[in-house]
Image (cartoon, helix red, strand yellow):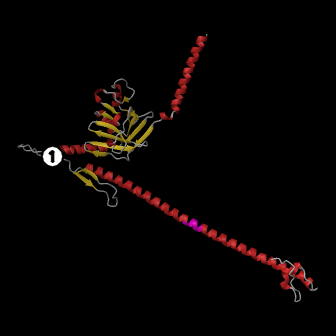
Amino acid sequence: MGKRFFVVAGVLLSAALAVSGAHAALDNPFARAAEVNIGADSDWRVDAGSISKTGRGDDGLYYKLSLHKNQLSLKIGKQAEVETDPKSYKALAIEDLRIDGKRLPLFQWCLNHQQNHNRFLQQDLEVKDGICMNHGERGEFVVMLNRQTLDLIENGERLRFVIRPFRKPVHVNYDISDFSEAYAILQARAAASQRAAASAPAPVAVQPAPVVKPVEVQMCKLAAPQDFASVAAQEYVCGDAADKRRAQQRIDTAVKQAQQRRQRIAAEKEKQRLAAIAAQQKAEEERRKAEQARKAEEAAIAASEQKRHQIMDELTKKMVGVCNKVWSKGKHRCYCERYIEYAPPGIQSDASCKREG
C-alpha cells in the first residue's frame, strides 16, 4: 500500500510539474517571436544578374533577401550593405520558410535530408546535394530553387523566414507581391544581353587574337520632374517599353512619397506658426490682465487714501469743535495740541504737551 501511494504521488507530481512547465512556457516572454516586417514600400534593387530587397529590423540589423540565378538567400548584416559587415552567429537555427502561411515543400525536403535530425536546419550540418545551406557564421541562409518553388514565390504575397539566432525566434517577413515585376525586369535585361551578344559580329581570327570586350546592354535614364530633385532618375533597357513603364512607375511612387513628405513638413510648419501666434496672443492677454490688475490696485490705493483723508477731515472737525469749547474759556489742553492751528488768537501752544504726528 505504501509503495503504491508513493508511485501515484510521483505520477501526480510529474503531471503537475509538466502542466506548470507548459504554463511557464506560455508566459515566458522569450517564447514570443520578434517581428521584422519589410513591406511593399521597400523597393527591389535590380543589379547585374540579381534582384534584392533590404530592410532594417528593430534590433538594428539589416535583412537582405536576394535571388541570384537559382539561389534564394537571406543575409543579415550590421549595415545596409550587409555583405560589408555581416552578422556572425555561433548557432543560428532556420526553423521554417513559408509562403502565404504554408511551409515550402523544398524546405521540408531539406529538413528530411539533413544529417542527424530534421527539427530545424542547424548551422554546420550538411543537407543532401547542398540544396539548403545555413552559413550562420557569416549571417547567411541559402536555398537552391527548383521551378516549382520559384513559381510559388512568383505567385505569392508574403514570404516568411523563421530563424532563431538566440533564445527568441525571429520572423523575417517580406512583402513579395511585386516580386514578379522585379523578376520580369531581371529576365528582360538578361534576354536583352543575350540578344545583343547573339547579334554581335564574330571576331576575325588574327594573330595575335584580339581581346573582345563583352557586349553590354544599353541602358537609358528616365528623370523625375524638375521640382523633385531628391527623386533619383531610373534606368531602363533602351527600347524596352515594358521596362520603361516600370521605371516610370518607380518614379511616380517616389514622387508621391516626396509629395507626402512635403505635405507633412508644411503641416508641421503651419502647426508651429499657429502655436507661435497662440503663444504671442496668450502673452499679450497676460500682459493686458497684469496691466488691468496694476491699475485696479492703484485705484484701490487711491480710494483708500481718499477715504483716509476723508475720515481724518471728519475727525479734525469733531476735535476742533470739542477744543473750541476749551479754547473759548481761554484754556488749552494737550489733546488739543495737535489742532492748535485752528485755535483762536490768544491760545498759545504748550511746549510741555507731546504733540502726536
Q: Is residue 127 magenta?
A: no
Q: What residue would you read off at disc 1? A: 213
Mark 1 secondary-structure assignment: loop
Residue 232 shown left or right of residue 196 in the figure? right
Residue farthest to the front, as pictured: 352
Residue farthest to the right, as pictured: 329
Most foreground residue, 153 or 136: 136
User: Where in the figure is residue 217, as x and y percent of width and height?
Assistant: 20, 48
User: Where in the figure is residue 236, as x and y percent of width and height?
Assistant: 26, 50
User: Where in the figure is residue 90, as x and y percent of width and height?
Assistant: 38, 32
Location of residue 100 by image quarter: top left
> Which segment did they paint magenta?
280-285
Residue at 36 percent of width and 55 percent of height: 255
Query: Is the residue 199 above or below the residue 228 in the image?
Result: above
Query: Is the residue 174 above or below the residue 126 in the image?
Result: below
Residue 312 shown left or right of residue 254 in the figure? right
Residue 79 shown left or right of residue 19 in the figure? left
User: Where in the figure is residue 174, as x and y percent of width and height?
Assistant: 38, 41
Query: Is the residue 303 above or below the residue 132 in the image?
Result: below
Residue at 42 percent of width and 37 percent of height: 171
Residue 322 shown left or right of residue 163 in the figure? right
Instruction: Specify few, some or many for label 1: CA neighbours under 10 Å numbering under 14, 14-19, or 20 or more.
Output: few
